[in-house]
Amino acid sequence: MTPALSVIIPTYNNAPFLERCIGSIMPATGSVEIIVIDDGSTDDTSKVLAGIPGLKIIEKPNGGVSSARNAGVKAATGRFVMFVDADDRLLPGGMDALMKGIHGFDADIVIFRSFSGDEECYPWKQFFREGATYSGGALLAYEYTRGSVCGCLYSRSFLTGNAIAFDEGLSMAEDTVYFACAQSIAKKICFMDIPLYEAIPRQGSASRGIDSTFLERYGKALTAARGRIGDPRMADFAILKILMGIVNVAAPAGYSASEVRKICPVDAVLPLSVSSFSHRKWLVRILNHSFPLFFGIKKWKDRIYG
């Protein structure tokens, strides 16, 4: 029988977290396929996975999270797919609540509620009505988009039918580019008031690692956002999100605006269209006028407000 849901878990040297992650999914009732992609791990990942029954395990040479997720989508057979990072987990009761309603979902993307500690990630309840459907473009009236692909369901036929895939050349902001590509062509996005996903920050995770190449990797994401996202307005939103992420990382690491511009193709992706934005026109005008001024304002704002 075709499963209702394929859960895709990419993992690279996450052996200590796998039982917690998979255990948060497995109590679910209903038809769930759990696909774990071992992306060339060198720790005890294979040993841990061998002790957990009922998994579909794919072993591949290390190629990064984007290639692992693409491999998972290719192997999936469920009506919907969901991405879960191996060092995160689903909240208690979340999977059961999701599965009780999954057969009634009729959307390209279903967005649930996600948390990191006590803070909600990408909150939506103040803007959107639960169960109603919106086009991806309609969400931009409220400047809603996401920098994470987790905490959502995606119709597998929507992804494969539109050739939506992760850019395997990206290792920074790959989620931002992927979600923007999907959102830009989605005709039906709905929200469900189910607390589902818990992102658990930890030292050394891919999204938090800072090394000598991190600006180059962010720069590739800027180029991909302008080149891969078909809707220019959506591309502007993704580029602004990536640029804000660059400042959030570069400023505390001691980089200056001029150093960032030497490495990242900032000037190649500007100017952004001010008319694309509803609530941050002033910020976009500053960015278009002067990246150093944008960098400085964002840097000091973050210092003041944390």
Image (spheres, rainbow, N blue to C red):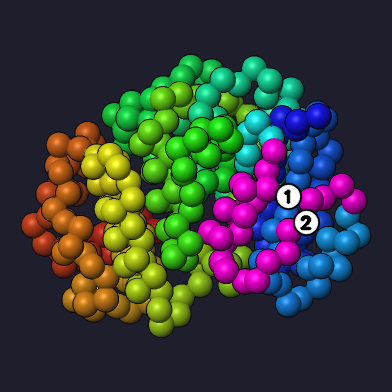
Please tell me which residue is depicted at 33% across the width and 26% down the height of the picture. 138
Query: Along the polypeptide, which appears first: circle 2 or circle 1?
Result: 1
Please tell me which residue is depicted at 34% across the width and 66% down the height of the picture. 220
Q: Position of residue 234 (x, y in %)?
A: 30, 41
Are discs 2 and 1 less than 8 Å apart at CB? Answer: yes
Q: Position of residue 39 (x, y in %)?
A: 66, 66
Is 35 above or below relative to 30?
below
Q: Position of residue 9 (x, y in %)?
A: 68, 53
Where is residue 102, by image quadrant?
top right
Is residue 58 one of those drawn in magenta?
yes
- At label 2, the amino acid type is Ile
- Taking depth in this image into account, of 263 and 225 the one nearest to the observer is 225
- Taking depth in this image into account, of 239 and 117 the one nearest to the observer is 239
Q: Which residues are magenta?
A: 53-77
Q: Which residue is mark 1?
A: 35
**Hey, which residue is sitting farthest left in the picture?**
289
Is 104 above or below relative to 121?
above
- Taking depth in this image into account, of 201 and 270 the one nearest to the observer is 270
Q: What's the CA distance linking mark 2 and mark 1?
A: 6 Å
Please tell me which residue is depicted at 11% across the width and 62% down the height of the picture. 290
- At label 1, the amino acid type is Ile
Is residue 4 one of those drawn in magenta?
no
Q: Is residue 198 visible?
A: no
Q: Is residue 137 visible?
A: yes
Please tell me which residue is depicted at 51% across the width and 29% down the height of the picture. 108
Quadrant location, the N terminus: top right
User: Which SS class for mark 1?
Assistant: strand
Quadrant location, the C terminus: bottom left
Q: Which residue is mark 2?
A: 57
